[in-house]
């Protein structure tokens, strides 16, 4: 009786996820409202994949998209708030919470012509 030699398995390449999430700056007072108002795109749209993405430390690009209202025209201003290190899920949640509270308060106090209702935080892989 001869035994078959097993072929070694090829190493799996790491999965490169793509996509982003958008978090509104206002209108979500409770966790449920916040979850319902968050929009997911790309790999974030699939819940099990989103759990895999958020399950370990990763580097994210964080942008604050502000809707500028001026007397002559209206447009968007994008502020890059990308952290300098990889974040886990809890650190990412704290960053979004900080932006949604502290940065919005700064905008309101500065009396900058921003429509906060249409502004959002964007987390990009």
Image: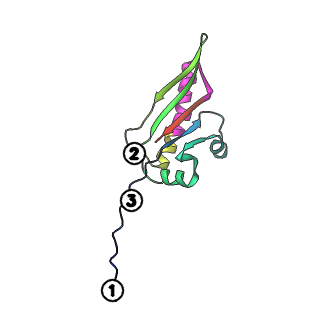
Q: Mark 3 points at which residue?
A: 12
Check if mark 3's residue and mark 2's residue have beta carbons within 8 Å: no
Tell me which label, 2 or 1, sits earlier in the chain: 1
Q: Which residue position is annotated with label 1?
A: 2
Residue at x-position 53% and y-position 26%: 106
Residue situated furthest front in the rendering: 1
Secondary structure predominantly adopted by residues drawn in magenta: helix
What is the number of the mark on residue 86? Answer: 2
Q: Is mark 2 on a helix, strand or loop?
A: loop
Marks 3 and 2, how far apart in space? Answer: 23 Å
**123 or 31: nearer the eye?**
123
Badge 3 element: loop
Asked if the residues shown at circle 3 and circle 1 are in contact, with their CB atoms under 8 angstroms apart, the answer is no
From this viewpoint, is residue 111 visible? no
Q: What is the span of residues highlighted in magenta in the rendered image?
A: 96-118
Residue at the image point whose x is 48% and y is 39% from the top: 124
């Amino acid at each position: 009786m001869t035994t078959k030699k097993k072929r070694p398995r090829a190493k799996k390449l790491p999965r490169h996820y793509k996509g982003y999430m958008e978090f509104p700056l206002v209108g979500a007072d409770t966790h449920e409202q916040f979850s319902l108002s968050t929009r997911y795109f790309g790999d974030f749209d699939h819940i099990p994949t989103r759990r895999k993405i958020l399950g370990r430390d990763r580097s994210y690009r964080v942008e604050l998209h502000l809707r500028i209202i001026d007397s002559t025209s209206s447009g968007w201003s994008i502020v890059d708030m990308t952290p300098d290190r990889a974040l886990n899920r809890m650190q990412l949640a704290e960053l979004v919470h900080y932006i949604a509270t502290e940065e919005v308060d700064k905008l309101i106090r500065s009396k900058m012509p921003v429509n906060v209702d249409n502004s959002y935080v964007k987390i990009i892989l």
